[in-house]
Amino acid sequence: MVSSSWVQEMRCLSLWESWQRAALTERVGLTGNEPSENRAKARKDFSIYYKQTKFSERKQRGKRNMGKFTFTETEIPGVVVIEPQVFGDDRGYFMETYQKDQFAAAGIDKEFVQDNQSRSTRGVLRGLHFQKNHTQGKLVRVTKGEVYDVAVDCRPHSATFGKWVGVTLSEENKKMFYIPEGFAHGFLVLSDVAEFCYKCTDVYDPTSEGGIPYDDPTVNVQWPDCGCEHKTSAKDKLHEPFAAQKFEFFEKW
């Protein structure tokens, strides 16, 4: 069976070759050999795919067992669910939650410079947040309780711009979630209490705070039932709608 990633690669290569032919004929003044696709679209499609996959460095999707961690890529490239190997017995358990070399081998090679922790009660919805400057990648997990964690692609040139992906994180499943730079992030607490920990690739900058509404109609995140009304901060209620923002600060990602 031919993989969808292979098909996408061949399609983008074809678009790129067509665009090159069109650019050449344009330079020499020829006509009639342009591709059916708009040249700008072909160039943009190729650029998006090249940036996200780096062709020769592109990693195969699916689960990748790196020893003490299993990395599962989601439908949005770069957003990854990580499951640690847990060693347990009648005394309790032990696990590693981060190992630089294994994470780097799986494509998560950013340096983490700040660790945060929060405690929230059922129905608390924090997000959807991002920083315009000092843009943060985040590695998140739950040490108590359960949350539904969401990443929204806010990169203007991304093929998955405006798409979201979510995962349940809990003290039982011990899953972690990696959200790269250029995404909005948020979570909803599904248990009576939840303690949430995250590692960040850049420092917190209160002057760069940004976000989108958790119930934005364009993004349309499907939050699960938490058993009560959502509790959000006054600041989170003031975020501009997704469709009203240009996200030019995320163009480099």
Image (cartoon, grey):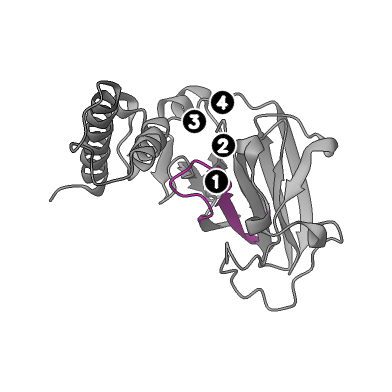
The quarter of the picture where residue 25 lies is: top left
- Pointer 4 residue: 110
Q: Is residue 174 above or below residue 9?
A: below
Closer to the N terminus: mark 4 or mark 1?
4
Q: Nearer the viewer, residue 15 or 115?
A: 15
- What residue is shown with label 1? 176
Q: Which percent across, then down, holds residue 41?
A: 37, 42
Under circle 4, the secondary element is: loop
Residue found at x 18% / y 38% = 32
Q: Position of residue 238 (x, y in %)?
A: 82, 59
Residue at point 56% right, 26% down? 110
**Which residue is tagged 3?**
108
- In which quadrant of the rendered view does residue 13 lie? top left
Name the element at disc 2. Answer: loop
Q: Earlier in the sequence, mark 2 or mark 4?
A: 2
Magenta residues, start to end: 144-163
Q: What is the CA distance from the residue labelled 2 to the residue labelled 1? A: 8 Å
Q: CA distance from mark 2 to mark 4?
A: 15 Å
Q: Nearer the viewer, mark 2 or mark 4?
A: 4
Callout 3: few (<14), some (14-19), or many (20+) C-alpha neighbours within 10 Å?
some
Q: Residues within 10 Å of mark 4 (few under 14, many from 20)?
A: some
Q: Is residue 122 magenta?
A: no
Mark sitting on residue 203: none
Secondary structure under tag 3 reads loop
Q: Earlier in the sequence, mark 2 or mark 1?
A: 2
Distance, label 3 to label 2, CA atoms, is 14 Å
> Circles 2 and 1: CB distance less than 8 Å?
yes
Q: Gap between marks 4 and 1, in whole Å?
A: 16 Å
